[in-house]
Amino acid sequence: MQLVAKLIQVLPVQTGMGKNGEWRKQSIVLETDGMYPKKVCVTFWGDKINESVLQIGGILDVSFDIESREYNGNWYTDLRAWKIDPVSATAPASGNPGQPAPAAPPVDFSGDSGDDLPF
Protein backbone atom coordinates (compact mmCIF):
# COMPACT_ATOMS: atom_id res chain seq x y z
CA MET A 1 0.00 0.00 0.00
CA GLN A 2 1.00 3.60 -0.36
CA LEU A 3 0.31 6.74 1.67
CA VAL A 4 1.19 10.39 1.06
CA ALA A 5 1.02 12.35 4.30
CA LYS A 6 2.74 14.95 6.49
CA LEU A 7 5.31 13.81 9.07
CA ILE A 8 4.26 15.07 12.51
CA GLN A 9 6.39 12.98 14.91
CA VAL A 10 9.53 10.83 14.87
CA LEU A 11 9.64 8.31 17.72
CA PRO A 12 12.96 7.13 19.23
CA VAL A 13 14.87 4.24 17.64
CA GLN A 14 14.37 0.94 19.48
CA THR A 15 16.98 -1.84 19.48
CA GLY A 16 17.20 -5.32 20.92
CA MET A 17 18.63 -8.81 20.54
CA GLY A 18 16.70 -11.65 18.93
CA LYS A 19 17.48 -15.19 17.83
CA ASN A 20 18.82 -13.80 14.52
CA GLY A 21 21.00 -11.13 16.14
CA GLU A 22 20.51 -7.46 16.87
CA TRP A 23 17.40 -5.72 15.52
CA ARG A 24 16.53 -2.05 15.14
CA LYS A 25 13.25 -0.27 14.42
CA GLN A 26 11.87 3.24 14.30
CA SER A 27 8.28 4.45 14.18
CA ILE A 28 6.99 7.68 12.69
CA VAL A 29 3.56 9.32 12.93
CA LEU A 30 2.00 10.74 9.76
CA GLU A 31 -1.12 12.87 9.34
CA THR A 32 -3.28 12.57 6.24
CA ASP A 33 -4.70 15.57 4.42
CA GLY A 34 -8.39 16.28 3.96
CA MET A 35 -11.48 17.35 5.79
CA TYR A 36 -11.01 14.70 8.50
CA PRO A 37 -7.24 14.13 8.90
CA LYS A 38 -6.14 10.80 10.37
CA LYS A 39 -2.94 9.98 12.23
CA VAL A 40 -1.09 6.84 11.15
CA CYS A 41 1.93 5.21 12.86
CA VAL A 42 4.31 3.40 10.48
CA THR A 43 7.36 1.35 11.52
CA PHE A 44 10.69 0.94 9.69
CA TRP A 45 12.91 -2.06 10.43
CA GLY A 46 16.66 -2.49 10.08
CA ASP A 47 18.45 -0.68 7.26
CA LYS A 48 15.24 0.85 5.85
CA ILE A 49 15.56 3.76 8.29
CA ASN A 50 16.66 6.88 6.36
CA GLU A 51 16.89 9.67 8.91
CA SER A 52 17.82 12.31 6.32
CA VAL A 53 14.25 12.15 4.93
CA LEU A 54 12.56 12.43 8.34
CA GLN A 55 11.96 16.19 8.63
CA ILE A 56 8.98 17.23 10.79
CA GLY A 57 6.35 18.92 8.61
CA GLY A 58 7.66 17.33 5.41
CA ILE A 59 5.33 15.52 3.02
CA LEU A 60 6.35 11.88 2.57
CA ASP A 61 5.37 9.14 0.14
CA VAL A 62 5.48 5.92 2.18
CA SER A 63 5.10 2.39 0.76
CA PHE A 64 4.21 -0.21 3.37
CA ASP A 65 2.71 -3.63 4.05
CA ILE A 66 -0.06 -4.35 6.57
CA GLU A 67 0.33 -7.40 8.76
CA SER A 68 -1.83 -8.66 11.64
CA ARG A 69 -0.99 -11.42 14.10
CA GLU A 70 -2.70 -13.07 17.03
CA TYR A 71 -1.15 -13.37 20.50
CA ASN A 72 -3.07 -14.75 23.49
CA GLY A 73 -6.44 -14.16 21.87
CA ASN A 74 -5.67 -10.55 20.91
CA TRP A 75 -4.90 -9.28 17.41
CA TYR A 76 -2.11 -6.79 16.71
CA THR A 77 -1.64 -4.93 13.42
CA ASP A 78 1.64 -3.48 12.12
CA LEU A 79 2.25 -1.12 9.24
CA ARG A 80 5.75 -2.08 8.09
CA ALA A 81 7.25 0.48 5.72
CA TRP A 82 9.66 -0.71 3.05
CA LYS A 83 10.20 2.56 1.13
CA ILE A 84 10.00 6.24 1.98
CA ASP A 85 10.51 9.21 -0.33
CA PRO A 86 10.03 12.93 0.20
CA VAL A 87 7.38 14.47 -2.07
CA SER A 88 8.94 17.27 -4.12
CA ALA A 89 7.24 20.64 -4.43
CA THR A 90 7.08 20.20 -8.21
CA ALA A 91 5.17 16.89 -8.05
CA PRO A 92 1.68 17.01 -9.58
CA ALA A 93 -1.13 17.14 -7.03
CA SER A 94 -3.13 14.55 -8.97
CA GLY A 95 -0.75 11.84 -7.70
CA ASN A 96 -1.66 12.58 -4.09
CA PRO A 97 -4.39 10.19 -2.89
CA GLY A 98 -5.13 12.44 0.10
CA GLN A 99 -6.27 15.30 -2.12
CA PRO A 100 -9.90 15.50 -3.28
CA ALA A 101 -10.53 15.48 -7.02
CA PRO A 102 -11.23 18.89 -8.59
CA ALA A 103 -14.89 19.79 -8.89
CA ALA A 104 -16.59 19.49 -12.28
CA PRO A 105 -17.70 22.73 -13.96
CA PRO A 106 -21.34 23.71 -13.28
CA VAL A 107 -23.96 22.61 -15.79
CA ASP A 108 -26.66 25.04 -16.95
CA PHE A 109 -30.08 23.34 -16.92
CA SER A 110 -32.06 26.52 -17.54
CA GLY A 111 -33.15 25.32 -20.99
CA ASP A 112 -32.06 28.48 -22.81
CA SER A 113 -28.91 27.27 -24.55
CA GLY A 114 -29.27 29.59 -27.55
CA ASP A 115 -29.96 26.89 -30.16
CA ASP A 116 -33.28 25.60 -31.55
CA LEU A 117 -32.77 21.90 -30.94
CA PRO A 118 -35.73 20.21 -29.21
CA PHE A 119 -33.47 18.21 -26.87
Image (tube, helix red, strand yellow):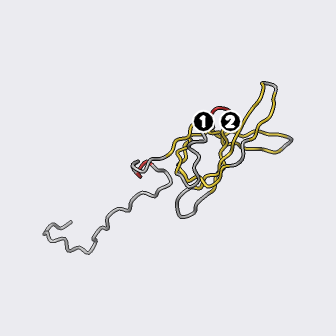
Where is residue 25? Give x, y as percent.
Answer: 71, 38
- Quarter of the image where one finds residue 83: top right
For this rendering, which residue is in front, 66 or 56?
Answer: 56
- Quarter of the image where one finds residue 42: top right
Outermost residue, front direction? 52
* CA distance separating discs 2 and 1: 8 Å
Outermost residue, right direction? 72
Identify whether 117 is placed above or below 71: below
Q: Residue at x 72, y 42 (%)?
A: 13
Crowd band around label 1 with a 10 angstrom C-alpha radius: few (<14), some (14–19), many (20+): some
Where is residue 45? Give x, y as percent.
Answer: 68, 35
Left or right: where does residue 93 sit relative to residue 83?
left
Q: Name the kind of residue labelled 2 in the image.
A: Trp
Where is residue 100? Give x, y as percent.
Answer: 46, 58
Left or right: where does residue 71 sit relative to residue 106?
right
The first of marks 2 and 1 along the sequence is 2
Where is residue 57? Give x, y as percent.
Answer: 56, 55
Residue 63 image label:
none
- Quarter of the image where one finds residue 80: top right
For this rendering, which residue is in front, 4 or 101?
Answer: 4
Outermost residue, top direction? 20
Q: Residue at x 53, y 47 (%)?
A: 60
Q: Name the kind of residue labelled 1 in the image.
A: Trp
Q: Residue at x 77, y 29 (%)?
A: 22
Give the residue number, with chain letter if any, for mark 1.
82
Secondary structure under badge 2?
A: strand
Left or right: where does residue 41 sit relative to residue 83?
right
For the C terminus, give its image quadrant: bottom left
For the N terminus, give its image quadrant: top right
Identify whether 90 is placed above or below 84: below
Give the residue number, with chain letter if any, for mark 2.
45
